[in-house]
């Protein structure tokens, strides 16, 4: 992109820079990303970017924040029940990761302390408190949920497309020699669809059931089991 002419205002803002940076990473990846390349994309001097975002680390945080904003933007109304909030959040987070596979490693490997990230955690933990869940269970829930999401999504997004397959249906598991791996061969049909929606739903429900079971144990066995909660449509 041609550099702007001298004396012409750059018209930069933190939001515009972050959006341009996210677009650049989407197209070219993190490996080649840098302030100078972004400045060339915007047609400005690199120092113009530093006037709004102080350094590459802060710029990467701004990129993370820009794509995290999509999670809330695609959920016009959040439910009240904490498990429904967690489900909605997880599905929107997965959708965002699939749209931005080259950006997603930033979210999984860097601490997310932006307002949009903290607002999401506040929404979930506040709903858990309203449900009377013990504070220790609530404190552990974000790490449990996002530890699963980040690890699972990194695994499927970093896999070869022939292995991870289509986001909706996933891919078939490799064939196992039943003479050498009899248990894996027997289970293989139940593990079909690696990276697909059905597998994601199964594993997410296992995680949420575990959190709910921990909440029940912390309450001395009181409250309905996780299986009694009816899942709403996505």
Image (cartoon, rainbow, N blue to C red):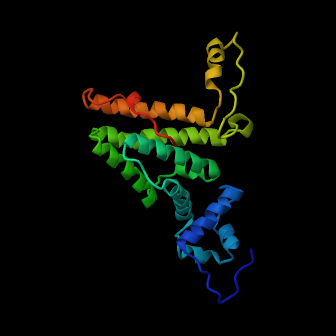
- Up-down: is 6 above or below 160? below
Tell me the quarter of the image containing the N terminus: bottom right
- Front-most of 22 and 206? 206
Q: Is residue 114 visible?
A: no
Where, by quadrant of the figure, is residue 185 drawn? top right
The residue shown at (59%, 42%) is: 154
- Front-most of 167 and 30? 167
Image spot of residue 11 (x, y percent): 59, 80
The residue shown at (70%, 86%) is: 5
- Front-most of 78 and 18? 78
The residue shown at (49%, 53%) is: 75
Total marks shown come to 0
Left or right of 5 on screen, residue 89: left
Left or right of 48 on screen, residue 209: left
Where, by quadrant of the figure, is residue 178 drawn? top right
Image spot of residue 195 (x, y percent): 63, 36
Where, by quadrant of the figure, is residue 197 drawn? top right
Q: Is residue 9 visible?
A: yes
Image spot of residue 60 (x, y percent): 56, 60
The residue shown at (61%, 14%) is: 183
Image spot of residue 135 (x, y percent): 28, 41
- Up-down: is 190 above or below 5? above
- Up-down: is 62 above or below 191? below
Which residue in the rendered view is the most extreme toward the top?
179
């Amino acid at each position: 992109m041609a550099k702007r002419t001298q004396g012409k205002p750059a018209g930069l803002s933190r939001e515009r820079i972050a959006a341009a940076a996210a677009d650049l990473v989407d197209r070219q990846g993190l490996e080649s990303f840098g302030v100078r390349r972004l400045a060339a994309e915007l047609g400005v001097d690199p120092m113009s970017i530093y006037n709004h975002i102080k350094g590459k680390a802060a710029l990467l945080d701004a990129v993370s924040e820009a794509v995290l904003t999509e999670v809330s933007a695609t959920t016009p109304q959040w439910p009240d029940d904490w498990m429904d909030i967690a489900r909605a959040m997880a599905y929107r987070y997965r959708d965002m990761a699939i749209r931005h596979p080259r950006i997603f490693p930033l979210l999984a490997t860097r601490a997310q302390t932006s307002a949009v990230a903290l607002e999401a955690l506040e929404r979930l933990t506040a709903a858990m408190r309203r449900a009377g869940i013990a504070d220790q269970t609530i404190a552990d829930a974000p790490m449990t949920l996002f530890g699963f999401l980040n690890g699972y999504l990194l695994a499927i997004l970093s896999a070869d497309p022939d292995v991870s397959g289509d986001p909706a249906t996933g891919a078939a598991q490799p064939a196992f020699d039943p003479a050498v791996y009899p248990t894996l061969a027997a289970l293989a049909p139940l593990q079909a669809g690696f990276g697909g929606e059905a597998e994601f739903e199964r594993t997410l429900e296992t995680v949420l059931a575990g959190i709910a079971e921990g909440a029940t144990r912390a309450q001395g066995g009181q409250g309905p089991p996780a299986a009694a909660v009816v899942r709403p449509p996505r």
